[in-house]
Image: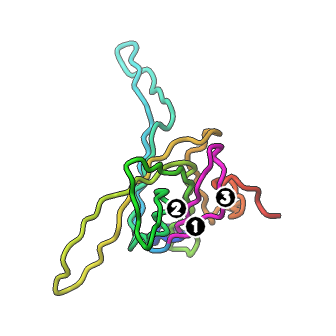
Amino acid sequence: MAQRTVKIGLDNWEVATLDDADKVTGTPTAIPGLTSAQLSITINSANFQADDGLWAVLDGGISAMQLTIGNADLTSEAKAVLHGLTLEDGMEVYTADMTIPYVATIFRSRLNTGKYVWFGLAKGKFVPGGYDLNTRAETPSGQPDSLVGNFEPRADKITHIIAREDNAEFDMEAFRAKIFQTVPAG
């Protein structure tokens, strides 16, 4: 019997800014401190009735994806990549007319076998979030940042890719190339 697996960790978050042709501009940025990732996928479907019962379930594909990220502390440099904001004199400057860039992102979850499951989202925007801060109590507790990304299909209709290291054909370079729209090394 094959070993049973379960996800037990989360790390290696990277984000890359996309241009108007959905191509990565520059090198992907590693953002340390990933504490949580929740991916919600909405698929449009409807029941079609005929002969006094369910005749078919119609689906229209993925209509929305949302990634909620928890991070120990998003640095100003990470926010500049994620939100396209300007850094001036050590300050994050948010403006009413700021344009949030499209990004591609990857992260991984560790399996109890030591292998990883990689998640890649092809095109989306992370909107600046609010803050939920508390006073320090007798026993300090962490207050991670949270932000939400809304994702859509790229021009090639790819929304997301999941790659498992326990699949025989797993190729990390091919996975990165597919998400970040680059040519794999080799």
Is residue 164 at all visible to an observer of this figure?
A: yes
**Helix, strand or loop at disc 3?**
helix
Which residue occupies the extreme top position in the image?
51
**Residue 29, disc:** 1
Above or below 137: residue 168: above
Q: Nearer the viewer, mark 3 or mark 2?
A: 2
Q: Which residue is mark 2?
A: 81
- Answer few, some or many: residues within 10 Å of disc 1's Cα (few below 14, many 20 plus, some between 14 and 19): some
Above or below 14: residue 179: above
Q: Amino acid at mark 2?
A: Val
Q: Which residue is mark 3?
A: 175
Contact between labelled residues 1 and 2, with CB atoms less than 8 Å apart? yes
Q: Amino acid at mark 3?
A: Phe
Quarter of the image that includes the C terminus: bottom right
For image coordinates 46% across by 59% down, the residue present is 85
Q: Nearer the viewer, residue 8 or 136?
A: 136
Q: Position of residue 48 (x, y in %)?
A: 41, 20
